């Protein structure tokens, strides 16, 4: 993997404050950096890694962010989905508020831009009319859903472990995206009009089937599909969360009778694995693992890339962006 850029200052508003860090890229506007499930603000960096400005502010009033689900560039706007206030918030390139629309669905999840007003969101909406449909085209200007799709047969049974966790790719150049459920290495490609293009089923030796929720701290952390991406050359990237080799010794937190994983403890409990497949040849190209729970996929100039939270010798957190070597 080749380093593209590092984002984050040693001090000031451009500092990366740790946590579960996500990155989005735009060919003109640069990078968005945000932390889930924080209340913001979102940080904007240029392509060279220079901090530019903040977008949004914490709060629960008009134009304020109560809790980030996802943020992305949609047309000429920056759009944030707020799970606490249940609003789609729109900002211009400088961070000024443009407006907001009520999120009318039950489920929330990561979303990918389709055009100037529409996105496709990956989430399970448990209402009877849409149950077990993992993909939703939504008009972010009005907040209203346009289309629900993405299920193949009964593979989205909502009672399965982690059934509510949806892994999806960014929209590819062909106008399609890939989607899969967290606990199974079965995936499908869909066109944005709701038509199934292809599906892939099977078993992977590093991805044992998840039959039940594990007991945190006692059972081995399960392998879970987190996100997907496709390249122009026809490669499929699959990012999974796997058990850290030292997971038994990881520091965990007990609250009452419940064992929980705080964000600063996650790297000792889980790692991240990237696998790349050549779809045309039907072969597994290779893999790479990070000793980090927070490696993420993003689309960079139409190609897959990976963001990883790293620390300098002075323990300054920075987000490193890597792309595959050519």
Image (cartoon, rainbow, N blue to C red):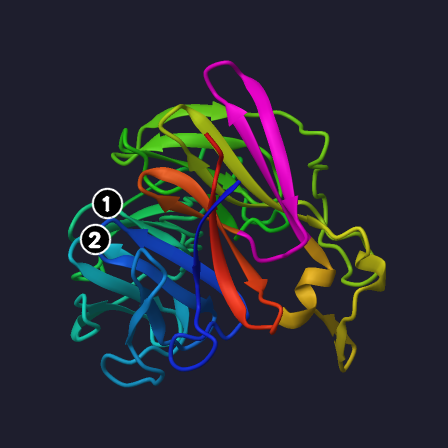
Displayed quadrant of residue 176: top left
Vertical arrangement, residue 10 with respect to residue 24, above or below: below
| Residue visible at 23% across and 82% down in the picture | 62
Asked whether residue 11 is in view, the answer is yes
Q: Residue furthest front?
A: 313
| Residue visible at 50% across and 13% down in the picture | 281
Vertical arrangement, residue 191 with respect to residue 67, above or below: above
- Indicate left or right for 122 with 204 as reference: left
- Marks 2 and 1, Cα distance to the nearest angstrom? 17 Å
Asked whether residue 153 is in view, the answer is no
Q: Label 1 neighbourhood size at 10 Å, few (<14), some (14-19), many (20+)?
A: some
- Indicate left or right for 268 with 81 as reference: right
Q: Nearer the viewer, residue 133 or 89?
A: 89
Q: Label 1's element?
A: loop
Displayed quadrant of residue 192: top left
- Indicate left or right for 234 with 159 as reference: left
- Indicate left or right for 209 with 69 as reference: right
Residue annotated with mark 2:
28
> Do tag 2 and tag 1 residues touch (Cβ < 8 Å)?
no
Residue 3 position within the rendered picture, expressed as x and y whole percent measured from the top left = 48, 47
| Residue visible at 61% across and 73% down in the picture | 315
Give the residues in magenta. Answer: 271-295
- Choose the circle earlier in sequence order: 2 or 1: 2
Residue annotated with mark 1:
114
- State yes or no: residue 292 in magenta: yes
Q: Label 2 neighbourhood size at 10 Å, few (<14), some (14-19), many (20+)?
A: few
Q: Nearer the viewer, residue 15 or 251?
A: 15
| Residue visible at 54% across and 42% down in the picture | 181
- State yes or no: residue 274 in magenta: yes
Please tell me whether the stretch drawn in magenta is mainly helix, strand or loop. Answer: strand
**Disc 2 or disc 1, which is closer to the eye?**
2
Q: Label 2's element?
A: loop
């Amino acid at each position: 993997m080749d380093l593209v850029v590092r984002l984050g200052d040693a001090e000031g508003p451009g500092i990366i404050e740790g946590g579960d860090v996500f990155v989005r890229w735009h060919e003109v506007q640069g990078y968005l950096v945000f932390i889930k499930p924080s209340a913001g603000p979102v940080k904007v960096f240029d392509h060279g890694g220079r901090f530019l400005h903040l977008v949004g502010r914490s709060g629960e009033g008009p134009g304020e962010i109560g809790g980030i689900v996802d943020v992305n560039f949609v047309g000429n706007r920056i759009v944030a989905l707020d799970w606490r206030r249940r609003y789609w918030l729109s900002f211009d390139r400088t961070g000024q508020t443009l407006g907001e629309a009520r999120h009318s669905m039950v489920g929330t999840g990561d979303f990918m831009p389709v055009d100037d007003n529409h996105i496709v969101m990956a989430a399970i909406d448990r209402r009877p009319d849409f149950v077990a449909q993992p993909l939703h085209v939504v008009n972010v200007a009005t907040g209203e859903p346009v289309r629900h799709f993405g299920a193949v047969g009964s593979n989205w049974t909502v009672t399965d472990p982690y059934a509510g966790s949806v892994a999806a790719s960014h929209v590819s150049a062909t106008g399609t995206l890939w989607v899969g459920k967290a606990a199974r290495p079965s995936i499908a490609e869909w066109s944005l009009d709701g038509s199934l293009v292809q599906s892939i089923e099977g078993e992977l030796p590093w991805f044992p089937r998840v039959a039940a929720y594990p007991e945190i701290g006692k059972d081995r952390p399960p392998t879970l599909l987190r996100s997907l991406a496709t390249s122009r050359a026809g490669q499929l990237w699959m990012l999974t969360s796997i058990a850290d080799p030292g997971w038994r010794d990881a520091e965990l937190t007990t609250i009452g009778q419940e064992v929980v994983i705080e964000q600063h403890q996650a790297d000792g409990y889980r790692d991240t694995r990237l696998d790349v497949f050549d779809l045309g040849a039907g072969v597994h190209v290779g893999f790479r693992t990070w000793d980090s729970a927070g490696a993420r996929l993003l689309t960079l100039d139409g190609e897959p890339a990976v963001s990883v939270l790293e620390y300098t010798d002075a323990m300054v957190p920075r987000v490193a962006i890597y792309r595959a070597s050519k």
